Amino acid sequence: MRWRSVVLGLLLLRLGLQALLALLPALARGLCLHPRLPCPSPRPPALPGPPPGAAARGARLWGAAAGGDEYERRYSGAFPPQLRARLRDAARGMFVFGYDSYMEHAFPRDELDPLHCRGRGPDRRDPSNLNINDVLGNYSLTLIDALDTLAVMGNSSEFQKAVKLVIDTVSFDKDSTVQVFEATIRVLGSLLSAHIIITDTKQPFGDMTIKDYDNELLHLAHDLAVRLLPAFENTKTGIPYPRPLCPCSQVNLKKGVPPDSHNETCTAGAGSLLVEFGILSRLLGDSTFEWVARRAVKALWSLRSNNTGLLGNVVNIQTGHWVGKQSGLGAGSDSFYEYLLKSYILFGEKEDLEMFNSAYQNIQNHLRRGEACNEGEGDPPLYVNVNMYTGQLMNTWIDSLQAFFPGLQVLIGDVEDAICLHAFYYAIWKRYGALPERYNWQLQAPDVPFYPLRPELVESTYLLYQATKNPFYLHVGMDILQSLEKYTKAKCGYATLHHVVEKTKEDRMESFFLSETCKYLYLLFDEENPVHRSGNKFMFTTEGHVVSVDERFRSSLWEDILPAGEGSLKAKPSELKAANFSSNCNRVPDERRYLLPLKSNYMRQIDRMVGLI
């Protein structure tokens, strides 16, 4: 009788398992990813798996136990193509909602107030309100900044309509005092990007041509740049003139440099103009713009510390004395390093690469704390703020702008270190659903708690995915997209978070949300985008504007007129090809493409560092 009981028990167990398996599809259909995203289809096609033997080799490499831990269960494995397509459409929908809301409620003003559904321009009543007046010049900023995002998303009809609106309505003959850096990266850069897209004979994004187009966007860019040139005049160092009260260059578009301007400027603000000014010079055949921008870069570079090779973050343009001695990778410094490398990639000037390589080595020597990434014991890598002369720690906070640095590391092939640093910023995002403007890593708390919809973490996530093709970064993008929908969506767009803990909102949607944040999210999930598939080579400016990397930007007609010692050798084609270090991405083996980019014990350690667990 005992054997009959055993047989009966096994039969009942089998029937129970079959019933459970039959119910699983229905249960899966009942689980939605997000209330604003549709549920998965009931019968998705088979998902692509890792290369033959990769999973087994990966398990041996990482010592993963059968079934893995919570990190492996959540992040490793292939990413369903249907889910990826829905997230691509959700990113496009996010852009469309923000853009349409701006056009309906704010155009032709500069920005959208998403809570009150109205536009805003410069604060005429309070000229000292630099948070607004730095950026807004009464020239339909958000429309201009979003032009190439329309093209990247393939919306030719709206792109053509927006370009015509810019041509017909935008003028820079304004009594507006703007920051040179912001006007350059947001406005000048977008005008140049859109012009390049319109005139590209290959038309990789679809038909983005404009009937009877006569280089109007290029003429607008030229007009704006000419109005910015007074900031470079009458400075003893060649570093552009500063704006009053706050360290970044400022100029009035109608009257020139304000008479009461102070003499301090930030390194990033003065030294991150070379890409846009260089493109303009090479399109026009006029050396003026690249010459003044390159002179400013060289002047800043010459002021670096003899001891550490580091630069500070605020300098007096008349004396060359460093007023701000903090050396870091965040606000005031970030894009200076970014544009040393990107100028080399675009123009092929060897001196730009030499400066970048030297700066990068000094950053590794003096700013990097922690142990080797993904191996050994000790704290994970972190880049801190130090005294430029001594390399000694100055404070215990990092800011959200630093999250761009893993993306820059991808461009030079330092993928492993980029993986670790990115994981740190992602851990902060997971804790708050956003990146606070400043985060104190010692106190494990925000020092400055607002989040203005910045794109830097999304940018690095996108570039790391392009380098590794690891589905982990699609999960990261999904988390970011869901957080933005959950915490920042407003009645008429997306709003700045006033406090990342309390999730209160501010009535502002900065233009870079459309030009960068939405664009990088969309590209992360759009594997078939022409940026990835057209055969063209593209580079993104510091404002996320897409420009083609082609030979016309690597030739100039004015090398013989540069002052003595200011000429530079051109990189050979083979050296230019190495600028993106794409071959170095192969250092991430195939068996890791379907596993975590970091061992789970290191991810857990990073989560613990930020107080997440």
Image: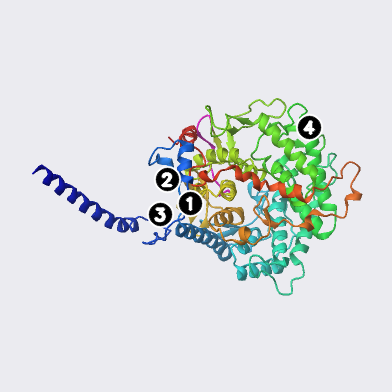
Looking at the image, is 433 positioned above or below residue 545?
above
Of labels 4 and 2, earlier in sequence is 2
Q: Position of residue 464 (x, y in %)?
A: 58, 47
- Disc tally is 4
* Residue 240 visible: no
- Seen at 74% across and 35% down, the residue is 358
Q: Where is residue 407 in the image (x, y as percent from the top left)?
A: 62, 45
Task: Quickly name the residue at label 4.
Answer: 321
Residue type at mark 4: give it: His
Looking at the image, is 193 positioned above or below residue 57?
below
* Residue 521 visible: yes
Magenta range: 441-454
Q: Is mark 2 on a helix, strand or loop?
A: helix
Q: Where's the C terminus, which quadrant?
A: top left
- Seen at 48% across and 51% down, the residue is 478
Front residue of this view, candidates 32 and 140: 32
Task: Quickly name the residue at label 3.
Answer: 33
Residue type at mark 2: give it: Arg
Of labels 4 and 3, earlier in sequence is 3
Comparing marks 2 and 1, which lies closer to the viewer?
2
